[in-house]
Image: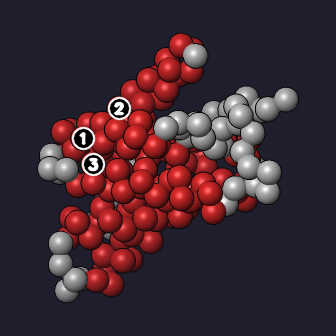
Amino acid sequence: MLNNILRHIFRFTVLVLIQIFVLNNIQLGGFINPYLYVLFILLLPFEIPDWLLLFIALVVGLTIDMFANTQGMHAAATVFMAFLRPFMLSLISPRDGYEFGTKPSIAHMGFTWFITYASILVFLHHLLLFYIEVFRFSEFFRTFFRVIVSSLFTLVLILITQFLFPAKKPR
């Protein structure tokens, strides 16, 4: 139990530091903004209580907001993503449900399941984040293009991370 908590704290620290010091400084053409920190919420265990999931998402979002000076935008988008996560998990759950101890990763659930799960939640996170940032619909299509391109780039980074640091396979 303590080992799992320490692993999550380490993952949180690494992802936030990568986001703050590397990815926040990448803006390719003004359209691509990768947000790898959402991987932390995606990889939390299936068994986590909903209230704790929302609280952790708030802490993650506020941490990014504090360093990016975005005044709650990341917190709102991350809490929104965490709020939709249980519903998303129930929609794409296996016929027998999730086994205790399995993790939402490629190694445990398979590539197709993980890409479906991650792509929908990352897209919804980016959709809310970018429309809060712009806060007007006059640039609807330009902002939507940013959402699509940034979501794809973020998904590529998430997949690279999943393949570089695979979870231990279930027995």
* Residue at position x 18%, y 78% in the image: 136
Q: Which mark is residue 75?
A: 3
Q: Where is residue 65 in the image (x, y as percent from the top left)?
A: 22, 44
Q: Quick check: marks 3 and 1 in contact, CB under 8 Å?
A: yes
| Disc nearer the start of the sequence (3/2) | 2
Q: Which amino acid does label 3 sit on?
A: Ala
Report whether residue 34 is seen: no
Q: Badge 2 is on which residue?
A: 17
Q: Position of residue 52 (x, y in %)?
A: 41, 36
* Residue at position x 26%, y 70% in the image: 131
Circle 2 packing at 10 Å, graded few (<14), some (14-19), many (20+), is: some
Q: Where is residue 16 in the image (x, y as percent from the top left)?
A: 36, 35
Q: Badge 1 is on which residue?
A: 62
Q: Which of these two is toward me, 138 or 5?
A: 5
**Where 101 falls versus 6 (above or below)?**
below
**Where 35 falls versus 163 (above or below)?**
below
**Where 97 falls versus 164 (above or below)?**
below
Circle 3 packing at 10 Å, graded few (<14), some (14-19), many (20+), is: many
Q: What residue type is labelled 2?
A: Leu
* Residue at position x 27%, y 48% in the image: 75
* Quarter containing the N terminus: top right
* Residue at position x 32%, y 65% in the image: 128
Circle 1 packing at 10 Å, graded few (<14), some (14-19), many (20+), is: many
State which mark lies toward you, 2 or 1: 1
* Quarter containing the C terminus: top right
Q: How far apart are marks 3 and 2 (CA)?
A: 17 Å
Q: What element carries label 2?
A: helix
